[in-house]
């Protein structure tokens, strides 16, 4: 079964990503639409990060409420990625005070800014890989592969040599008949993979993605915000300290992020909790692989300088810009 990719317009760019049953495209896209209601580049950095965190929380609330396998549930993708719905969610964000989380999903009719809290879930996973590549003819691939945990299901297909995945754990653990990600026979679980390609005038600008369970979504989102709104170079955008809010009571943050922004964000009402060790732990926040495309066929390949031991990024015929 094929589904058209998600698409949102952000700062004059077209951002394409994966359709449900992955929640990556819809959640990254919705958060970008929410952030697009404000000019982040005109704000102090901590104020812009405050909006990034709250937009993530709001998009995750809607992800949990509305996104599942479209063969089994009616995913309101058009609404979730619409300007009207983004406005109805953006008005929940206080300029100086953190949004209370977990928070309720938005009303699909786009009405109101009602406050409220609801149960949030965090479905992080491990053993996911991501790669991006492009060729001289202009073909671009952003590809995320996961078997959910080390060893997957622990079963190798006889004569084929590959492991079966263990994606059953991506369903919501507690059965709720109203949950779009409840377990059902033949149904695909909701994932968080977010392979993303950004175009300007139908030509590639960026390709980005990451492993990291549900932090994939915030990793891709924060990398895009770093590059597009904060005008960092792509290597800087990837290396920048990260934080992830997925509609949970606390923000998972790298220690360098806490050291740099923790005091101001704590004063705004956030509770920042350190993530795993940047070199070894699977509990860290993502591991980006990305490409940026320049005039005259030039391409910059970027991978993590430190996280998970550092990534690998190369071009066939390297030239300095």
Image (tube, helix red, strand yellow):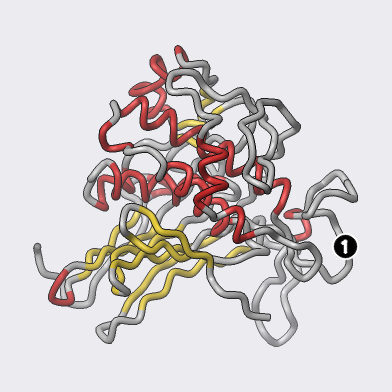
Q: Position of residue 245 (x, y in %)?
A: 55, 35
Label 1: state its secondary structure: loop
User: On screen, 277 above or below 12?
Assistant: above
**Residue located at (59% from left, 26% from top):** 250
At horizontal 71% and vertical 27% (from top left) the residue drawn is: 117
Please identify the quarter of the rendering in which residue 294 is found.
Answer: bottom left
Residue 222 vs residue 10, the one in the foreground: 10
Name the residue at 77% across, 71% down. 71
The front one of 296 and 71 is 71
Q: Position of residue 13 (x, y in %)?
A: 33, 60
The residue lying toward the viewer, choosing from 129 and 155, is 129
Q: In the rendered picture of this protein, how many numbered marks are placed on residues?
A: 1
47 or 238: nearer the eye? Answer: 47
Q: Residues within 10 Å of mark 1 (few under 14, many from 20)?
A: few
Q: Which residue is mark 1?
A: 184
Residue 184: x and y, percent?
Answer: 87, 62
State the residue lying farthest toward the top: 267
């Amino acid at each position: 079964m094929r589904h058209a990719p998600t698409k949102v317009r952000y700062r004059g760019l077209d951002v394409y990503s994966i359709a449900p049953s992955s929640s990556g495209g819809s959640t990254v896209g919705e958060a970008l639409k929410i952030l697009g209601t404000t000019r982040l580049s005109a704000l102090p950095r901590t104020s812009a990060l405050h909006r990034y965190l709250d937009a993530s929380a709001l998009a995750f609330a809607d992800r949990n409420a509305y996104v599942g396998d479209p063969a089994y549930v009616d995913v309101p993708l058009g609404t979730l990625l619409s300007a009207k719905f983004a406005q109805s969610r953006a008005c929940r964000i206080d300029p100086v005070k953190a949004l209370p989380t977990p928070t309720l999903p938005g009303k699909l009719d786009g009405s109101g800014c009602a406050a409220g809290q609801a149960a949030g879930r965090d479905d992080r996973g491990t053993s996911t890989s991501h790669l991006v590549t492009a060729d001289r003819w202009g073909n671009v691939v952003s590809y995320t592969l996961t078997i959910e945990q080390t060893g997957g299901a622990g079963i190798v297909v006889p004569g084929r040599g590959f492991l079966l995945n263990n994606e059953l754990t991506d369903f919501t653990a507690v059965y709720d008949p109203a949950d779009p990600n409840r377990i059902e026979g033949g149904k695909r679980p909701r994932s968080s993979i977010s392979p993303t390609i950004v175009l300007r005038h139908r030509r590639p600008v960026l390709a980005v993605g990451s492993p990291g369970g549900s932090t994939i979504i915030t990793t891709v989102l924060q990398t895009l915000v770093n590059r597009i709104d904060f005008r960092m170079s792509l290597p800087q955008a990837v290396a920048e300290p990260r934080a992830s809010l997925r509609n949970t009571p606390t923000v998972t943050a790298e220690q360098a992020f806490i050291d740099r922004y923790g005091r101001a964000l704590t004063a705004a009402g956030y509770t920042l909790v350190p993530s795993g060790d940047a070199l070894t732990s699977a509990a860290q926040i993502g591991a980006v692989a990305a490409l940026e495309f320049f005039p005259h066929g030039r391409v910059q390949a970027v991978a993590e300088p430190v996280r998970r031991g550092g990534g690998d990024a190369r071009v066939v015929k390297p030239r300095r810009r």
